[in-house]
Amino acid sequence: MGMFTMMSISASALSAERQRAEVTSANLANAETTHTDTGGPFVRKEVVFGTSNASPFQTVFDRAGGFGRPTSGAVQLTGVVNDTTPPVMRYEPGSPDADKDGYVAYPAINPVTEMVDLMGAVRSYQLNASAVSAAKQMIQESIDILKTT
Amino acid sequence: MATTPMLQVLQGFLKVTTERQQFITANMANVDTPGYHTRDINFKSALQQAMNPGGETHLEPASIELDNLPERPDGNNVNIDREGLMLSQTQLQYQLGVQLVKNQFHELLTAIKD
């Protein structure tokens, strides 16, 4: 059914945006982390979104056959990639993480970039949440046909 | 099976509106997907096809990609304002369809009662 497909598409976007916000929060929290389990400073992470499209043939076939199969347009998190920007070196000879020249490797994270990314994720989340309420309202209206006046 | 010809028409109208709303939802979901292009249906031809299901079925793609919208550097051309507007518009169209269906049943009921 079309209207429940709408809700599942929006739900996929809500989940993807939430994961994006999570990754961005982790970046912000670890902006000054110089020591990790794998050694070296924290590496900035970024999410990659992809769409799961049905093929045009599938779409036309379903339509011609009158099958109510959903026309997919859901979004999915295809991966979390590491930022390859080299770490920022700061001269701090007293730090336990300093190398032999006295430099400490800090993650190349700009808090402003992360904040903007976080805001983008929140806005997209709100947008999709409003799409969910629109779908809910439409379903409710359809149910109301059954009500006798 | 629709009881009146008007209901048959309304059934097609609601079907097409739902289908369009689905594409709008998908566009909204993919607002941050690189390379995604806005998709929509050809409302007129989809409506014509839905109105006469017995007629000749010329196969045409269910969705069209809109390429006339300005594209962002990541290849995505989803315009949030357009989608928001279309969401409300389609929702109201659907509401109209539902009200007309209700009206049809109400008329039927009146005919039975009187």
Image (cartoon, coloured by chain):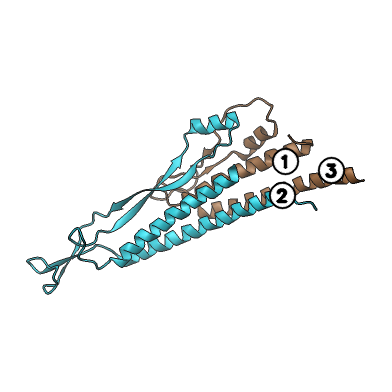
Chain colours: A cyan, B brown
Residue that badge 1 annotates: B10
- Residue B27 x %, y %: 50, 48
Residue in view at x 47 percent, y 55 percent: A14
Amino acid found under the numbered disc labelled 3: Leu
What distance separates the C-alpha of mark 1 from that of mark 3?
Answer: 15 Å
Assess disc 2: are there few (<14), some (14-19) or many (≥20) residues with their C-alpha within 10 Å of its C-alpha.
Answer: some
Evaluate if marks 3 and 2 touch, with contact meaning CB atoms under 8 Å apart.
Answer: no
Tell me where residue B1 sits by quadrant. Answer: top right
What distance separates the C-alpha of mark 2 from that of mark 1?
Answer: 10 Å
The numbered mark, 2 or 1, whose residue comes first in the sequence reads: 1
Residue that badge 2 annotates: B96
> Which structural element holds mark 3?
helix
Which residue reaches farthest left? A100
The quarter of the image holding the N terminus of chain A is: top right
Q: Is residue B21 visible?
A: no
Depth order, front residue of B60/A1: A1
Residue in view at x 39 percent, y 63 percent: A116
Q: Is residue B12 left or right of residue B4?
A: left
- Residue A20 x %, y %: 39, 57
Assess disc 3: are there few (<14), some (14-19) or many (≥20) residues with their C-alpha within 10 Å of its C-alpha.
Answer: few
Amino acid found under the numbered disc labelled 1: Leu
The chain carrying label 1 is B
Tell me where residue B57 sits by quadrant. Answer: top right
Residue that badge 3 annotates: B108
